[in-house]
């Protein structure tokens, strides 16, 4: 939901880097949810991009979650897979992968991009997401 973080007291981040990302997402028309620094962006093709502190508190990460097709009828999901992997690969860091097949009819691929510096993470993520902006390219 666009702007959800502003509507719920205590949900907007107090960290400069997260406020910058959340503000940019809102201005560019992205659908997202925020709780503190954690931000979850939903792209039109069913791909999710999540930014949060890494588990264990060691740095930060961008997690791109991509729905995977399980039948030939779902072949149209190939574009989502291509776009999700393209986003992750464009982040410019070594990636890790997790396959979530806990729900056999809805498998997900999670592509994890670790970062130490949240400001660099936000700069790169904005650069990567800008062409996908629902509001078009910024000046």
Image (cartoon, helix red, strand yellow):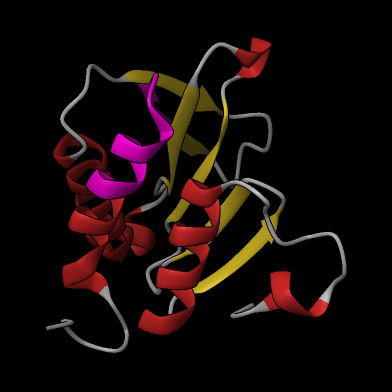
Residue 121 is a magenta residue: yes
**Where residue 48 sits in the image (x, y, percent)?**
48, 54
The answer to whether residue 54 is above or below residue 33 is above
Is residue 125 something one can see in this rendering? yes
The answer to whether residue 58 is above or below residue 9 is above
| Residue at 32% across, 55% down | 72
The answer to whether residue 60 is above or below residue 47 is above
Extent of the magenta region: 110-124
Q: Outermost residue, right direction?
A: 9
Q: Is residue 131 left or right of residue 101?
A: left
Q: Is residue 10 left or right of residue 88?
A: right
Q: Nearer the viewer, residue 69 or 28?
A: 28
Number of numbered discs overlaid on the protein picture: 0
Q: Is residue 91 left or right of residue 40?
A: left
| Residue at 46% across, 36% down | 63
Where is residue 134, by image quadrant?
A: bottom left
**Where residue 106 sits in the image (x, y, percent)?**
58, 46
| Residue at 18% across, 82% down | 138
Q: Is residue 29 left or right of residue 58?
A: left
Pick the quarter of the image with the N terminus: bottom right
Pick the quarter of the image with the C terminus: bottom left
Q: Nearer the viewer, residue 73 or 126?
A: 126
**Where residue 12 sits in the image (x, y, percent)?**
71, 61
Residue 17 is a magenta residue: no
| Residue at 41% across, 83% down | 27
Is residue 29 something one can see in this rendering? no
**Where residue 38 sits in the image (x, y, percent)?**
63, 45
């Amino acid at each position: 939901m666009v702007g959800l973080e502003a509507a719920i007291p205590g949900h907007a981040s107090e960290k400069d880097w997260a406020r910058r990302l959340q503000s940019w997402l809102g201005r560019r028309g992205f659908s997202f949810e925020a709780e503190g620094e954690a931000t979850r962006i939903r792209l039109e093709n069913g791909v999710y991009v999540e930014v949060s502190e890494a588990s264990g508190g060691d740095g930060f990460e961008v997690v791109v979650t991509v729905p995977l097709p399980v039948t030939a009828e779902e072949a149209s999901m190939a574009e989502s897979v291509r776009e999700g992997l393209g986003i992750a690969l464009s982040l410019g860091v070594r990636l890790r992968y997790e396959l979530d097949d806990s729900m056999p009819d809805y498998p997900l691929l999670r592509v994890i991009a670790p970062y130490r510096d949240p400001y660099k993470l936000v700069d790169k993520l904005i650069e990567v997401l800008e062409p996908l902006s629902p509001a078009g390219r910024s000046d």
